[in-house]
Image (cartoon, rainbow, N blue to C red):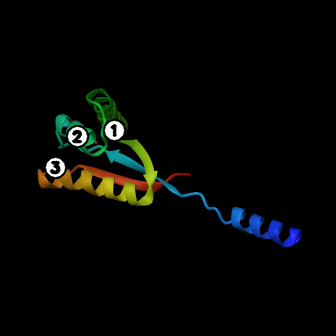
Amino acid sequence: MGDLDTRNITDIKTKTKRLKLYKVSLENDDYTPREFVMRVLMKIFRMSEKEAYHKMMAAHQQGSCVISIYIKDIAESKARDATDMGKECGHPLVFNIEPED
Ligand code: TYC
């Protein structure tokens, strides 16, 4: 009985899998107003005005900037909602996702 129980417990433990994480990045463009980018970051990613300013400026100066890291479903819906918010107002703002290494 002892041997069998120990093996079963080990099997259960090794089946625990870590969830894969995804980065959401903000892409720079030449048209979207800076204030609008900040509004999207504050609304969809719950940033303070100061954090939103720094992330927006990082994308503006470097071409893109990682905003945050989430499980797949959340990363996809945040990137889609944020990109849609730009589209609805006629801005070409884009958020992309990619697997974290
Ligand atoms: N480059 C834009 C401008 O000068 C502002 C901007 C910043 C747009 C960051 C997108 O991800 C972005 N109006």
**The residue positioned farthest toward the left in the image shown:** 89
| Residue occupying image coordinates x 27% and y 46% | 44
> Considering the numbered disc 1 on the image, is that residue within a helix, a strand or a loop?
helix
Alpha carbon distance from label 3 to label 1: 16 Å
Residue 34 falls in which quadrant of the image?
A: top left
Q: Given contact means CB atoms under 8 Å apart, are the residues at marks 1 and 2 in contact?
A: yes
- Quick check: is the Cβ at mark 1 less than 8 Å away from ligand 1? yes
Q: Nearer the viewer, mark 1 or mark 2?
A: 2
Q: Which mark is residue 91?
A: 3
- Quick check: is the Cβ at mark 2 less than 8 Å away from ligand 1? yes
Q: Judge whether 40 appears above or below 48 on screen.
A: below
Instruction: Name the amino acid, label 3.
Output: His
Q: Which residue is mark 2?
A: 37
Picture quarter with the N terminus: bottom right
Q: Which residue is mark 1?
A: 59
| Residue occupying image coordinates x 18% and y 50% | 86
63 horizontally vs 34: left or right: right
Q: Judge whether 22 appears above or below 12 on screen.
A: above
41 horizontally vs 12: left or right: left
Q: Judge whether 97 appears above or below 2 on screen.
A: above
Instruction: Name the amino acid, label 1.
Output: Ala
Quick one: 62 or 38, which is closer to the camera?
38
